[in-house]
Image: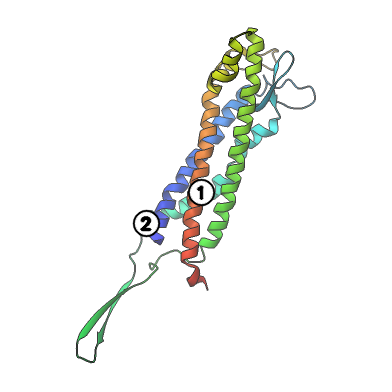
Amino acid sequence: MSYSAERSLSFLYPFVILTSLVCCITSAVAWTHWRYVLNACPDTNCGCILYGRTAYNSFEGGNIAYCHYATYGLLLPLLFAVVLGVYHGYRICIGKGKRKAGTTTIRQRSGDMIVVTTESELTPDGLSPYYWLPATVISVIMAIYQLVYAAIFTDGFEVTCKQYRESVLKEIQGVGNIVPVIKARLSCAAIFDFMDFLVESISYERRRYGRINTSVCLYLTLVLSWFALLGWIAICVINIVNMRRTRAARV
């Protein structure tokens, strides 16, 4: 059981590392591309692509703290995932000892001989039963943290998409049947495509260089943040099961 659990963890931690790393990179690409163009607030830095809002004659970004969190917020879970992933990966790669088995012979009164084979519950180099409790606490905390991250990013994504729908309608002076099409039928990917081509720099200091596919960056961060959450939940389940299984050994 311990070996199969470690084998699963040696795959789950790299999965979490990969998804979290891509989230950090793609959110950073979107943030750095739009941070000057969307920063149209007079008093605060609002150059974040998340939680954008429609202004009277421009489109403003959300508070820059949201993009700081989207870019750097997963560094803490990444740290734990890298350390624990390397630990379990190393233990799996160097090979695991088989469970220690032993045999004994019992002579019955009738003279019959019975051979009894026993097998230890833990391998000679198996994990200490005291490992699973702190590992469980860490994984549960990281799962909750990842849930908060994914929820905030999803909400910021939806707010920007909804607000820029209004900006598109003003830009094209949409009336009549075009209004429900823009508001209800176009996907957020299409809305961000409009943003890539319609939002231009209004001053030299707030210029942007070239164009990116904003929808791809944001959707990658959005989807992979939830995948990372699923990875942490799976890690939690494995740790909790093994913590309960080794409870007797810790007493």
Residue at point 39% right, 61% down? 1
Residue at point 38% right, 55% down? 92
Task: Say which amino acid is labelled 2.
Answer: Ile
Q: Nearer the viewer, mark 1 or mark 2?
A: 1
Q: Quadrant of residue 159?
A: top right
Q: Which residue is mark 1?
A: 233
In the image: residue 63, left or right of residue 148: right
Residue at point 55% right, 45% down? 78
The answer to whether residue 182 shows anywhere in this view is yes
Q: Which residue is mark 2?
A: 94
Q: Is residue 90 above or below residue 100?
A: above
Q: Residue furthest left?
A: 111
Q: Quadrant of residue 42?
A: top right
Decide which of tag 1 and tag 2 comes sooner along the chain. Answer: 2
Location of residue 29 in the rendering, given as x and y in whole percent from the top left corner: 57, 27
Task: Say which amino acid is labelled 1.
Answer: Ile
The answer to whether residue 48 shows anywhere in this view is no
Q: Is residue 4 above or below residue 76?
A: below
Helix, strand or loop under label 2: loop
Distance from disc 1 to disc 2, alpha carbons, whole Å, reads: 27 Å
Residue at point 45% right, 43% down? 15
* Dots 1, 2 in contact, CB < 8 A: no
Colouring used for the render = rainbow
Location of residue 13 in the rendering, given as x and y in whole percent from the top left corner: 47, 48
